[in-house]
Image (tube, helix red, strand yellow):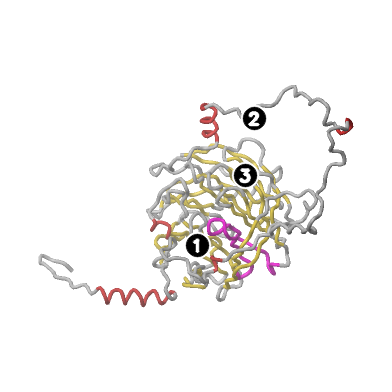
Amino acid sequence: MFGCKISLIRFDTHAFLQLKKRRLQDFGPGTNLSIVSSDPLLLTSPLRCEISKKQDKPKPKGPQGKVKDQPLVFHSKIKSSGYTAAPRMKMFSPKTNVKTSQVSKIKKETSNGARKEYPLDVQAPSTLQKQITLCNKPTSACGIQYSGDGMKLACGLADKSLLVFSSTFSGEPAVFTGHDGAVNGFGWSYDRNWLVSTADDRTVRIWNVKNTASALVLGKEIFSKPARFPQFYYMDRFILLSSGAEIQLMRYYLDESKDEIKRYQQNSVCKPVQTLQMESAVEITGLSAVNDFYSYIVLAAGSNRDIEIFDLNIGTRIATMSDVHPRAAHQICQNKGSAFSTQPSEAYNLFVTMSIGDCLKLWDIRTLRCVRCFEGHLNRYQSCGIAMSPCGRFIACGSEDKCAYIYETRSSIYLKKLPEHSESVINVAFNPSSPQLTTCTLDGKLQTYVP
């Protein structure tokens, strides 16, 4: 186009803006396809929904002039009242105002994990550090996921339980039991104090991580089909999940007060806010949204091989990506980053999809186009998991050849191949605070890798 000459190019700003406006109208009215939205929350947005908390019952007002309750004996002249007796002396009193030393305070902060930046120039994890077995007998896991601070790792098992390990795998794991079916999905809250899980028994439970108790249970009468892909959404204000071909947005309130008399009564509240229906899919096979910051976008993959994009600020579908894979995508993984890493805002618009019998595909939500394909792993019949590193450089996925693969987003061939697994690798997870990768096999064995 440009040779050995000077060219004068006329740029029509008005025509360019009109063309951009027409293209955006194809996605939806007033829609800007970006995970990090710059638009304010609308007054009619479903995300403005509030829930009324259960308040204490008002105390009954007695008749005016009623005499207050008094002790039966309150005269100081009567010896039996005890007011004339000498006060009892205390042998000792515990010291409650002792200040901790500066050294112990520093040790406590260090043990809890200091906030430090995730290294951006670190190499991909490839050195086997530790290997453990989840159960005494082979048990498959529906997924593994680190908490936001990277201190704990949760595993959902087919034996109807949830396990929460320390990230160092020291000590015994915390066991969460209560489901009557195999756990098919779970998610951490942003404050790391709660877990939400779903199972094949068509129930949803929210667990208190501190005491492994169920704070909220949603029964079978709410969902006609098993609920899947649960997660906290919009900075822990909502619960997002799927049931059949529907996306359920639910507002909740958790009551942590203890009442020994009414300890079996559930005081926590949850109500549906909005239901979003996929256009022609029979079932939702993948669901993803960001909880670490305020985002309106929700991605849903359907059994019709399409991916539909919903904007919960306006509460409707804004775009559809047709024939993403030859088969339905069984997982969507967004570049969510972490609290320990810093990425450009444009990097959060990338997400990865995976389907049986096809390669990994990296997409850009701004253009709705495939940016890059990753090939090398084996995935013919098993739904293998995928994960993106907190720095956004690496993509890990499982494989049926008893290996895990790590790709770099700038290259289409795999960067690392992690062998030494006993079975097919079906789940992978990156630690959000340190360069650590954990894999889970079909027979329930966890392996951690470091650079």
Q: Quadrant of the C terminus?
A: top left
Looking at numbered disc 2 in the image, what kind of residue is underneath it?
Answer: Thr
Residue toward you, 385 or 308: 308
| Label 2 vs 3, first from the N-terminus | 2
**Is label 1 in a helix, a strand or a loop?**
loop
Eye-nearest disc, 2 or 3: 2
Residue toward you, 234 or 330: 234
Question: Alpha-carbon distance for marks 3 and 1?
Answer: 26 Å
Q: Name the residue under label 2.
A: 96
The residue range painted magenta reads 222-246
Residue 218, by quadrant, is bottom right
**Is label 3 in a helix, a strand or a loop?**
strand
> Who's the residue at 83% across and 27% down the image?
85
Looking at numbered disc 1 in the image, what kind of residue is underneath it?
Answer: Asp
The question of residue 223 being in magenta is answered with yes
Whether 69 is drawn above or below 368: the answer is: above
Q: Mark 1 points at which residue?
A: 358
Looking at numbered disc 3 in the image, what kind of residue is underneath it?
Answer: Lys
Crowding near the residue tagged with mark 2, few <14, some 14–19, many ≥20 C-alpha atoms within 10 Å: few
Q: Where's residue 200, x and y in %?
A: 70, 60
Q: Mark 3 points at which residue?
A: 445
Q: Where's residue 407, x and y in %?
A: 44, 51
